[in-house]
Image (tube, grey):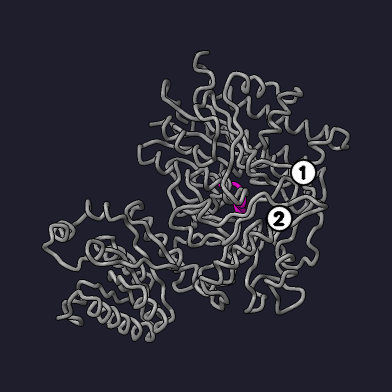
Amino acid sequence: MKGFTLWFTGLSGSGKSTLAHRIEEILLERGMKVEVLDGDVVRQNLSKGLGFSKEDRDINIRRIGWVCHILTRNQVVAIAAAISPYKAVRDENRRLIGRFVEVYCKASIDALKKRDPKGLYEKALRGELKNFTGVDDPYEPPEHPEIVVETDKESIDESVNKIIRTLELMGYIPAGESSEDYSAEEEEKIKKRLKDLGYI
Amino acid sequence: MLWLKKGKKRIFALGLDGVPFTLVKKFCADGTWKFIDRLARSGALRQMEVTLPEISAVSWPSFMTGKNPGEHGIYGFTDFKPQSYELHYTNFQDLKTETFWEKLGQKKKLCVVLNQPGTYPARPIPGILVSGFVAIEIAKAVQPLRYLAPLRRMNYQIDIDTHRCRSDHNQMFRELEHTLKVRQAAVEFFWDEIDWDFFEVVKTGTDRLQHYLFDAVEDESHPRHLQTVSYYQKVEDFIRSCWELFFKGRSADQEGEGFFMLSDHGFCLTRREFYLNAWLQKNRYLEFEKNPPEEIKDMKKNSRAFALDPSRIYLHRKSRFPHGFLNDSQAGQLREELKQKLLAIEWEGEKILQAVYFPEEIYSGPEIQRAPDLILLSRHGFDLKASVNKTELFGNSDLKGMHTFDDAFFWARESDREKLHITHLAEIFLKQLS
């Protein structure tokens, strides 16, 4: 299988890392080579020392993008989970990598404030944390992501299924054992039946 | 075999695929449906709108999830694979939201769902599922699989042989009768297999008959008219037998409680078919590499718009298709231009479209990004088709009936809603069983 990059973007706490690791498990089970680049982890090594100014954030995302590019080129599935708030840099990465699937983890700021597993929103709202995306720093949602998961409304399983299904339909990953896609023969029969009823 | 617990609150829902509200009213008025007429008088018979496009592939998912296509993600029998011109035949796996059967399951409630279109290949639900249209193999249409053998023993047939029946109407009536009988047998078989809370059966034969012979249904002088009436009377017998099973042993004051009937869209006579891709070609929005083309993927890269059945137009956006031609701003201008031109199309001085929608006007939810760019709603009688090999704009075929979006029906003992939409039904059922 060829490599590709699965890029999770969304506000802090929107489920990017959780989903990235769930997808990683499934793809590993399907015999694929997978690497997860988690924004929080990358900031402790590859991007250590970078801050949260727009310039530093852009450098961080470009670095993650470049690693994803190398991995993708070498038949690895690169999964990036980073807030990546600015559209222009995400699009730059899309152009660089080519086989790029953007997943927008969408959740309302109210739901995220309630969820707040790391207590970051609370700190940011109290002013103890500066340049916090969604509070005092902007987030530019993707205009045309391949996948949107509404993590404040969907269960984790629903979001995972949606991502896996899209990757299967795009031909980026092989169908799983439990996949219920039509066989070629079945598809022909369905096509014929739909034609007989004037539906296609 | 298991005896159903007495006194438990249950729902029985009966779907009649494609049966229009206006036809129900007509059959009640002319004495074809005496039993339904009694129900219509004592209960709440409502005209119902459905989601667009008004086809089973979309309507039934809207019914079973209570969501619009922007959430459940099904826009037709076919859809483009992501970032591709290849078509994908949508199936149960493509449904992006939970069904109300699954929600009932979370409350430890069980469902029996028979002949439900849009659920193939069958996957486990809390209870029993036998998929309907477009199910092909019975072995992939049943969950749990232990029910495969009994269904085979009753000679269960999912659908009529549409290919044969389209040209051989005698065969169609034979098969319609057989499918009605096996549906009845299946209802009786599954009735006390599990201690269900929700039982549903769908009849799709009505839709088949109406596609091929709606002129005979409407026209009393048509040589097949009486045969069609006789079929609808058998359908009514089937409904009455379900009613009797459901209310057996229950007191008179409970009559009607928990019993529901509905259709997934309406129907009307086809006056003319209108070929969208031919129109797009004629107006130079679409060009094909080869002549005649076989599929959408045969189009030239500089094409700007193309259609999928039944009434969906897609713009050739760079952000959506591998060889996309339009940026977002060009696409924004083009959809406005197309809308105006489409709304002006006439047949013998009569406009053929009643509305052209942008996705954000009729859909909401995360799947809206996959919606068509324009969704067309025709006036009754003008059937929108997307065949790529038609060169003429208007034509006719041997198909006599077409779907309508605003004339589905719903019946319940009582309803506090005057205006109903198919997406309301899941909530009604969940509330009743809460």
Q: Position of residue A8 (x, y in %)?
A: 33, 69
Instruction: Name the amino acid type tagged 1.
Output: Leu
Q: Residue at x 37, y 86 (%)?
A: A74
Q: Position of residue B155 (x, y in %)?
A: 65, 42
* Segment tinted magenta in the rendering: B131-137
Instruction: Name the amino acid type tagged 2.
Output: Leu
Residue under disc 1 on the same chain as residue under disc 2: yes
Q: Is residue B377 above or below residue B256?
A: below
Label total for image: 2
Q: Which residue is mark 2?
A: B384
Q: Is residue B141 above or below residue B316?
A: above
In the image, is B212 to the left or to the right of B11? Answer: right
| Residue A187 shows in the view | yes
Please state, as top left, top right, bottom left or bottom right, where the C terminus of chain B lies in the image. top left
Q: Which residue is mark 1?
A: B269
Q: Is residue B8 above or below residue B199?
A: above
Of residues B154 and B428, the one drawn nearer to the viewer in this rendering: B428
- First in sequence: mark 1 or mark 2? 1
Q: Residue at x 82, y 54 (%)?
A: B396
